[in-house]
Image (tube, grey):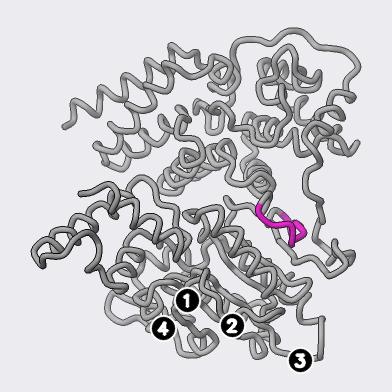
Amino acid sequence: MAAEDLSQLEDLLEARFGLSCSGWQRDALARAVTRWRERAASAGAGGLSVVTPEEVQRVVSEILVRETYFFRDQRQIEAMVDVALQERARVGAPGRPLRVLSAGCASGEEPYSLAITLQERAGHLAGRTWIHGVDISEEAVEHAREGVYGTWALRATPEATRARCFRAEGERFRLRDEHRARVSFERRNLLEPDPDFWKEGAFDVIFCRNVTLYFSERAIRSIFARFAAALAPGGFLFVGASETLRGLSDDFELSFHGDTALHRRRSEEGLLTRVTPGILSVAWMEDIQQASARVEMLTATKPGSSAAGVAVGMPAGVAVGMPAGVAVGMPAGVAAGGEEGPPLAQELRRLITAERYSEGLSLIRQASLLGEGRADLQLFEAIMLSGLGRVGELERVCARLNALHGEHAGAEYLLGLCREYAGDRAGAARLYRDALRTDPHFAMARLRLGLQCKAAGDLRGARTELREALAGLRVGPEEHVALFGGGFSRAALTAMCRAELSAVETSR
């Protein structure tokens, strides 16, 4: 296979579809290129000259991740119904149509979940709300139009909702016509211009969750700009919990409804001044250097030196690890808490070392009440909550870390521990992989993922992850082991990892 052919295909996919391929996606592209070159050689042609647009489209469908299910992140869906649509219904002419777009809708689970939730929580708005799903895959769109799903797609659907909204057809379930009628679908590339579809103010709400994770930065900026133009002023954009608009678009104001992040298109005048009751409006983080200076002013004296070990248990005995650079958006010295760091950071480190989590949490909350350092201290807050086993609060803090900083490796890892605590091994493994996508050298995430693979019977995956974890533990900074190693030394963590690796290697 010619490397230039693979590069040519990657350039084509980025230019036309916005895709930035990596890892297994490149392997899939390489296999496609090999097939195409073999066919071209037999036809007496060269390179990729005989590749059809349909074949390119088929490859795009193959490399897109379409893991979805009904009522995924139901809190976002409920926030759309309870907050976004309720607010938009009060704007404009009485009874005007409300338009919702599900961008990257895959096989329809998301827009149908919106329709069902809308009917059950705000039936008075259902008749005036139009929900439209678009996806780049014609196959996915046809599946969505059919409205027939297996049990895996309904794994988060309450039994009562399944019985009420679906009709069993053998081992599959067909969505009832009354809900299918509320949603329309079409194949659409989000990067392709269409002035009629993307006309100004066309939508009140846009859902685009976990769609841009595999896009290039150029494509993401273009898509968010298109969404901003297509949303009415004050309209809402929902993105995935691990996605962020920070540094990519200035067209939205970030708000929270409980722990759910909402992005509201700014009014023509700039920041929106009207705040819906129950939503905490927040501005983007101030400059990191200014925040660091404010945190330093909170304590008058410099506490003692740092200690060597910490026990952070969530669940009990589970080591909490953080890779180099994971504390995104924190001022220099806060993440490591070294001697040159701000005094407050040093004090928090001392309290973690002493396992005095309640005192540390009180100090963080006091700083927050003073209006100082909130964004800088959220990672410390998460660690304190982890040590106290306060899972619900920990999940909310991690969600805000992700909303403010983008996909935050530390937050994803802590959320993975929460899923382990809840007995959700698959969810934990997914979150550990999310953390590793942000930082591939995150040794503790590798270790936990390896253990999850082992528990699931995936010995090959366990061997791969545990080998990577062992290599990372050998060279990772001592600071991170000391602060986030769950009370275990580097030697103890290495020995544990080596023992787990030996166990799976003898189970071939």
Residue corresponding to mark 1: 188
Q: Are marks 2 and 1 in contact (CB under 8 Å)?
A: yes
User: Tag 2: residue type?
Assistant: Phe
Position above or below: 440 against 488: below
* Mark 4 and mark 2 residues within 8 Å of each other at the beta carbon: no
Q: Residue furthest top?
A: 305
Quick one: SS at disc 1? loop
Q: On the picture, is 181 further left or further right than 26?
A: right
Between the C-alphas of marks 4 and 3, the distance is 28 Å
Q: CA distance from mark 2 to mark 1?
A: 10 Å
Q: Which numbered disc covers residue 197?
A: 2
Q: Report the amino acid beneath label 1.
A: Arg
Q: Answer with mark 2 or mark 1, whichever residue precedes in sequence.
A: 1
* 500 and 391: which is toward the camera: 500
- Disc 4 is placed on an element classified as helix
Mark 1 near mark 3, Cβ–Cβ under 8 Å? Answer: no
Q: Judging from the image, what secondary structure is the residue with disc 3 in?
A: loop
Earlier-in-chain disc, 4 versus 1: 4
Task: Please indicate whether residue 348 sits to the left or right of residue 485 in the image.
Answer: right
What's the residue at 27%, 69% (across, down)? 55
Q: Which label sits on residue 95? A: 3
Mark seen at residue 408: none
| Residue 155 percent location from the top left of the image | 42, 63
